[in-house]
Amino acid sequence: MIAANDLLLSPGENPMRRDQLPSRDQLPSRDREEAVLRGWATVTLDQKIDDASALIRRVLSENGYPACITSSFQTECMALLDLVIQQQPNIPVLFLDTGYHFPETYVYRGQMTERMHLNLVNLASKMPVEEQESRFGILNQTAPDRCCGIRKVEPLFRGLEEYGIWFTALRRDQSPTRANLRTVDPFKLPTGHELLKVSPLADWTNADVWAYLKRRGIPVLPLYDRGYTSIGCAPCTTPPADPDNPRSGRWSGQKLECGIHIQSE
């Protein structure tokens, strides 16, 4: 018997079982991303790697703008870094040094920077942690949005002013706020400067990321072995409260995003 959930119905179409879904290569190229986004086509990891690499290549070759990549050194960041530096080894790797990261994150960042020969650029707030806490108290406890604004959003947006292409490791399955993520989107900074925000791993799953890292022999941040699934600043990160929501350990569930992926209106 075929369960109702095994059928995909579109207006004017015949019922289709999930095991009868077309592969990505059976669709015209213009329809592939839309089909994958809506769950109408299956894509293997090899195909996703090819697509991500092709997107990176196309964006870099068709645009003469300086490019950068942001990295928090989480698993998806390491997969994207590996793909991007194969094509542009010296691309600036922007790391938001909030002053609140786990010690393990700083150690891992140093190890992987040396191992992968990364062109690391540390971005920090103009206000040292000590001054912020003296003036405003512990904002990560009382006003996490404001803390993220000072320590993440302002430093990143200031750093992005130099670039026209911004590669990110965002994925659609990370959060409900990212479910409709496009692979290429214009992004406007508060100053009015616009750049291309490129997310080559948009359709990758968490399993895809881990499989890629295993295939490439890339070690991961040791905090994953302690049950963490989404890793940011130490005061605002715990193992997930909801096993089905990897980001449920961030900000004690008070919010879903730090603000760096929200552009000016």
Image: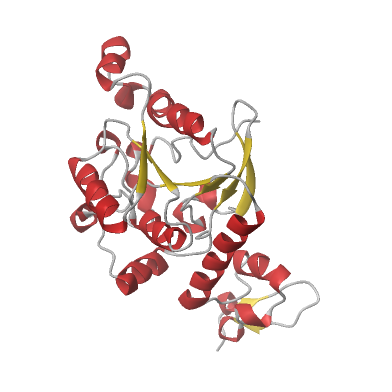
Image vertical order of residue 213 relative to residue 163, above or below = below
Query: Colour scheme used in the picture?
Result: secondary structure
Image vertical order of residue 151 relative to residue 256, above or below = above
Q: Position of residue 104 (x, y in %)?
A: 19, 46
Q: Position of residue 24 (x, y in %)?
A: 61, 77
Q: Position of residue 145 (x, y in %)?
A: 42, 27
Work out which quarter of the rendered image holds the N terminus and state it: bottom right
Q: Residue at x 49, y 56 (%)?
A: 171
Q: Nearer the viewer, residue 238 or 64?
A: 64
Image vertical order of residue 63 relative to residue 12, above or below = above
Residue 214 visible here = yes
Q: Residue at x 36, y 29 (%)?
A: 124
Residue 182 visible here = no
Q: Residue at x 29, y 37 (%)?
A: 233
Q: Nearer the viewer, residue 63 or 156?
A: 63
Q: Nearer the viewer, residue 48 or 55?
A: 55
Work out which quarter of the rendered image holds the C terminus and state it: top right
- Quadrant of the image occupied by residue 161: top right
In the orientation shown, which residue stands out farthest toward the top?
Answer: 135
Q: Residue at x 57, y 75 (%)?
A: 5
Image vertical order of residue 241 relative to residue 39, above or below = above
Q: Position of residue 206 (x, y in %)?
A: 40, 63
Count of numbered badges drawn on the protein: 0
In the orientation shown, which residue stands out farthest toward the right?
Answer: 12
